[in-house]
Image (cartoon, rainbow, N blue to C red):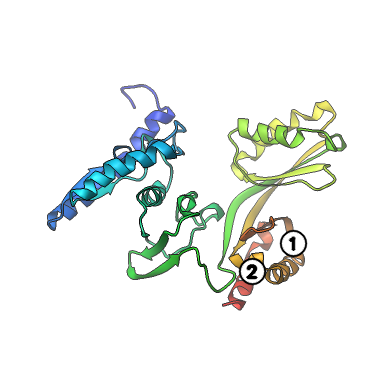
Amino acid sequence: VGTLGEFSDRIKDYVLSFGERLSSVIMGAVLEGIGMGVEVMTGFDAGIITDSNFGEARPLHEISEKLVKDKVGRVLSEGKIPVITGFIAGTLVGRGGSDYTATLIAKYLGANEVRLYTDAEAMELAYLGTKRFHPRTFEPLLNTSIRVRVTSLSNPEGGTLIDRLGGPPPLKAVATLRNLSLINVRGAGMVERLGTAAEVMGRAASSGVNIVAIAQPASEESITLVIDENNTEELKRKLEELMGRGVIREVESLSNISAVSVVGHGLRDNRVLSKILGKVARSYNEMIVWFKGNVSLTMVIRDEFLSDFVNMLHGEVLSYG
């Protein structure tokens, strides 16, 4: 970095990749030490090609699948074990990218099962704050019969099996995403005006703000956004620039809030959903986000009510156990 005189996204990706590179070399040496044939590869060497979105790259599936079948298939046909870095594929796939790379390769090769080893037992709740896995870890397997077994390093015989069959109980978990803020945009001029929501979201995108949740009532007089609290002032300032156009009258923000989600296929059952909504309606929530067919129900709540609210939801989840 000192020699180049820059710390661009490209250089940052390169620096961050060294931990993964060294880990794969160490794992390869361990396997070779017990007499196994090994070939150490980066994700790129294995055939995974991504776009140029540094730090959070997405794979180009068609060409990646062909290359992975050729390159990893060759290593397997030689009787060797491929040790593949997951974090790196030309550009960085992002935090937890090793898990995502594992499921991608499993899909490309038509594997029967993927095993993910972690330091804590967990289901995939990355979008909801647990941060055990890359948020896109399970996307490649959604329309396949490939099983995922999540197991702990301290208890490799135990763990969680994830497959298409599902199973009881109907509610699986409660997850919390903290350090959020809520921004509410109001204005009578928004009613029946085309493109207002797109303009609001465009302001967020141009500021590099990730929207956790968005809601707009049928009256169209307001739009509510939930974002990371660190982005509050920047986005609020951007949205206030729209106030002089006679569309937006007011931009309000509310800090110290969290998003709490209940997860489980039982939410597709109206009886289960109605029971949960009945409990939630009597609580101090600011916003509820759910769409028909979803397997998660998300509530936005002030931090001062968070502990009691989460305990109540845990009680509901356990009541189905």
The x and y percentages for residue 7 are 40, 27
Q: Is residue 282 above or below residue 102?
A: below
C-alpha separation, residue under disc 2 versus residue under disc 1? 13 Å
The x and y percentages for residue 96 are 42, 49
Q: Nearer the viewer, residue 280 or 64?
A: 64
Q: Are marks 2 and 1 in contact (CB under 8 Å)?
A: no
Label placed on residue 313? 2
Quarter containing the C terminus: bottom right
The residue lying at 59 percent from left, 69 percent from top is: 171
Query: Which image quarter: residue 114?
Result: bottom left
Q: Nearer the viewer, residue 99 or 138?
A: 138
Residue 293 seen by the camera? yes
Q: Which amino acid type is shown beneath numbered disc 1?
A: Tyr
Residue 26 seen by the camera? no
Q: Secondary structure at mark 2?
A: helix
Q: Residues within 10 Å of mark 1 (few under 14, many from 20)?
A: some
Q: Which amino acid type is shown beneath numbered disc 2?
A: Leu
Which mark is nearer the camera, 2 or 1?
2
Does residue 163 appear to the left or right of 233 in the view shown? left
Circle 1 sits on which residue?
A: 284
The residue lying at 34 percent from left, 27 percent from top is: 1
